[in-house]
Amino acid sequence: MKRLAMAGLMGVALLAISATAQARVSVSIGIGIPGVIYGPPPVYMAPAPVYMPPPPPVMVVPGPVGYVPYDPYWRERRWEQERRWERQQRYRERHYHRHYDDRD
């Protein structure tokens, strides 16, 4: 009897081991449906109104408008002024430096 019980116990153990040793692929798809939750609505407190005086009006006053006529000869006058300045510089270099050199 002991042999029969021992053989039965060994058979059950072998069946249990062989069942866990099987390799298989298992795929499951689940769609979760959320439960219904009911609660009181959220409390909203409106901020206090802020009253500000309107901004002062903006006054735009245009400045005086001047008219400068077009002068087609401005380049010639500018060149003449530069030449006159160069002549004055040359004159000063010739005459004033001569006096300073003579003092020594």
Image (cartoon, rainbow, N blue to C red):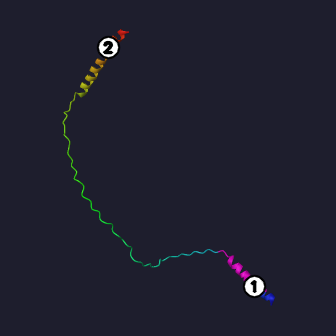
Residue 97 in picture, x, y percent from top left: 34, 13
Between residues 19 and 80, which one lies in front from this camera angle? Answer: 80
| Number of numbered markers | 2
Q: x and y percent of residue 12 in the render?
A: 73, 84
Is 3 above or below relative to 29? below
As for residue 26 lying within the magenta part, the answer is no
Specify the quadrant of the image occupied by residue 102.
top left
Residue drawn at (76%, 86%) of the image:
8
42 or 33, nearer to the observer: 42
In the rendered image, which residue does mark 1 sit on?
Answer: 9
Please give the name of the residue rendered at 25% of the width and 27% of the height, measured from the top-left corner. Answer: 75
Could you tell me how far apart the alpha carbons at marks 1 and 2 are, in whole angstroms? 135 Å
Q: Assign the magenta stretch its main secondary structure.
A: helix
Secondary element type, mark 2: helix
Magenta-tinted stretch: 6-23
Q: Quadrant of residue 86?
A: top left
The picture places residue 96, in percent across and down from the top left corner, at 32, 14
The picture quadrant where one finds residue 16 is bottom right
Amino acid of disc 1: Leu
* Left or right, residue 30 beside residue 100: right
Residue type beneath disc 2? Tyr
Left or right, 101 with respect to 8, comes to left
Residue lying farthest to the bottom in this orientation: 1
Q: Which residue is mark 2?
A: 96
Task: Judge whether 38 appears above or below 97 on screen.
Answer: below
* In this view, 85 is above or below 3: above
Foreground mark, 1 or 2, reads 2
Which numbered disc, 1 or 2, marks the residue that appears first in the sequence?
A: 1
